[in-house]
Amino acid sequence: MKTSTALQTAPARYPNRVHGVRNRDTVALYQPGFDIDLTGERMRRPALYSSSNRPAQAADDSGAQPPGQAADTADPSSAPSPPSRFPRAARLAKRLAKNQLYLLWSVVGLLALLLAISFSSPLRNPARKLTQEDINAAVLKTLETTVLPSPGTRAYDTIIPSVVRITGLGKDKDGKDDNERTSVGTGVVIVDKGVILTNLHVVQGAQTIKITFADGLESTASITGVQPENDLAVLQAHKIPDDLIAATMRSTADLAPGDQVMAVGYPFGIGPSASQGVISGLKRNFRSPEGKQMMSNLIQFDAAANPGNSGGPLVTMDGEVIGIVTAIFNPNQQRTFVGIGFAVPIENAASAAGMPPF
């Protein structure tokens, strides 16, 4: 094998540049601080001096250890960590983790923004308060689309289950027939056990009193109490319907002229009939042409009343009884209604039945 007989030295201008010695078999690299033998192997120069303060150590008899062996016996904690085998994958993983963090914070920010918008929208656009005009418009629309019963209809429907027809029976003129009708009038149930209020002149002198209830049931009745000064009588029916309803009574203390009222009864035996009017006055006195007793503290009303309405209820638009129809004023003997009727206040009527006043 041929060897090169010439050595190239590194120029002084480039102390760190590597120069090679070339032959056909060997390429030797030249570095400053190393000698090169003719085979191309590097040989370390012996150190001429050292600036270290560490004391010199004796060389091992076995010679210097190879660099690899010295690295194996060094302290693992002081050795630098070896570079990653996949630097590109590590950089990619680090970048993905950073992107995921950015994505997480973006989602959190978006949710916070949506919550802020949802809470601030009602504050920016509060619900409009209802005005009186809105309420009036809604009520008017309801009234236009819903047909409501009139106050008179409600009053009639409330009182009619408690109104009864009263017929007085007696002997005819020849004294042969005991079923001759001698009187006709109206009554009102005040206790659901069959206690009825009516006028005394309706049942006075009758040998038999017949009651016809709202459902058509007929029964006889007997007089259990009278109050002549107010022309009142209390009857007890001998047989009553299972679902008999007593009327609701109301005090007259808060009544005033002009209040709407209704008279319900059997004028001339026709009915039940309802007539509506107003209270014309309070605390009236009246003496009937055929009567001798002066009645006082009466309610004057203008609802139509005729013979047969006597003993019937005078009610408010709520269907509550405030009086018992007693008499009508007639300037002549025709017994026709001229717009003036009288009723006994219910307080007096209740006392006739033994009930406490309001």
Image (spheres, helix red, strand yellow):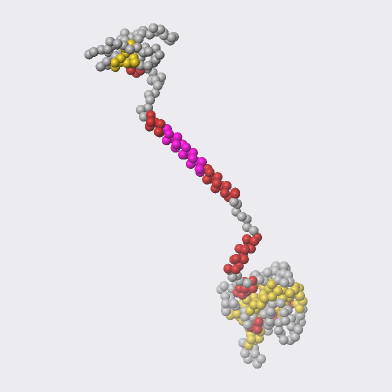
Residue 83, given in percent of the width and then of the height, sits at 38, 25
| Residue at the image point whose x is 72% and y is 73% from the top | 279
Residue 166, given in percent of the width and then of the height, sits at 63, 80
- In the rendered image, which quarter is residue 289 located in? bottom right
| Residue at the image point whose x is 48% and y is 41% from the top | 107
Q: Nearer the viewer, residue 232 or 275?
A: 275
Q: Nearer the viewer, residue 66 or 336?
A: 66
| The furthest residue to the bottom | 174
Q: Residue 179 vs residue 24: left or right? A: right
Q: Residue 341 vs residue 163: left or right? A: right
| The furthest residue to the left | 1
Membership of 9 in magenta stretch: no
| Residue at the image point whose x is 42% and y is 32% from the top | 94
For the record, the magenta segment spans: 94-111
- In the rendered image, which quarter is residue 254 located in? bottom right
Q: Nearer the viewer, residue 331 or 324?
A: 331
- In the rendered image, which quarter is residue 210 located in? bottom right
Q: Residue 22 vs residue 348: left or right? A: left
Is residue 280 positioned above or below 64 on the image? below
Task: Name the chief secondary structure element in magenta.
Answer: helix
Location of the N terminus (image quadrant): top left
Residue 49, given in percent of the width and then of the height, sits at 40, 7
Residue 189 seen by the camera: no
Residue 171, given in percent of the width and then of the height, sits at 64, 88
Residue 40 seen by the camera: yes
Membership of 105 in magenta stretch: yes
Q: Nearer the viewer, residue 56 or 353?
A: 56
| Residue at the image point whose x is 55% and y is 46% from the top | 117
Is residue 281 positioned above or below 45 on the image? below
Location of the C terminus (image quadrant): bottom right
